Image (cartoon, grey):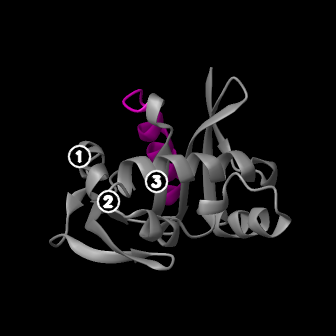
Amino acid sequence: MLTIRPYRESDAESVGRLIADTYSQFNLSFASADDLGKLLGPFRHAWSAEPAHREAIAQVIQAPLVLVAEEDGEIVGVLRGRRERLASLFVRGDRHRQGIGRLLAEQFEQECMRQEVTVIRVAATLYAIPFYAALGYRKTTGVRNGWSFEGTGLRYQPMKKVLEGL
């Protein structure tokens, strides 16, 4: 059974590996091997046992709201956000198109509505544009060139959703 729950510190290793795998595969395929490490930042060390690497990953995951999707004791999705901003959403590749990302986003939107937020913004990677559009997010400008950690060249689409039902 799939459960959406708050992130716990003990989730850091699993979440770090999920982000590293998913981000690399679906968002950073354009990057050279050298650039990939820069774009992944601390997530390039997701399989390291070094305490400093694990601490760096745990620090980056921290956000005002972090939700995980868990099934049978395994984390299959994660969403990080703060007031008015969906910072990142990752679902394990073999679990795409099964409603996990939608459930995470809906729970985040409900929390935003409890805080009387009326608009949520997201910098959608090019891969994620159709997903966010299906959830009711709309493009706000053209595609932009951005950065990720120490790397550059990450193209993204600013999008927003006006929340209804307040």
Measured in 3D between alpha carbons, the distance from the residue under mark 2 to the one under mark 3, in whole angstroms, is 10 Å
- Point out the residue furthest to the front here: 33
| Mark whose residue sits in front, 2 or 3 | 3
| Mark whose residue sits in front, 2 or 1 | 2
Question: For this rendering, which residue is in front, 126 or 47?
Answer: 47
Residue 159 seen in render? yes
Measured in 3D between alpha carbons, the distance from the residue under mark 2 to the one under mark 1, in whole angstroms, is 10 Å
| Range drawn in magenta | 96-114
Neighbour tally class for label 2: few under 14, some 14-19, many 20 plus, Cα within 10 Å: many
Q: Secondary structure at mark 1?
A: helix
Q: Secondary structure at mark 3?
A: helix
Question: For this rendering, which residue is in front, 162 or 158?
Answer: 158
Give the residue type that dot 1 points to.
Answer: Pro
From the image, tell me which residue sits under label 1: 130
Give the residue type that dot 2 points to.
Answer: Thr
Assess whether mark 3 and mark 2 are in contact (beta carbons under 8 angstroms). Answer: no
From the image, tell me which residue sits under label 2: 125
Across and down, in percent, residue 103 comes to: 47, 37
| Figure quadrant of the N terminus | top right
Across and down, in percent, residue 23 comes to: 46, 53
- Point out the residue furthest to the left here: 142
| Figure quadrant of the C terminus | bottom left
Question: For this rendering, which residue is in front, 33 or 164?
Answer: 33
Q: Earlier in the sequence, mark 3 or mark 1?
A: 3
From the image, tell me which residue sits under label 3: 23
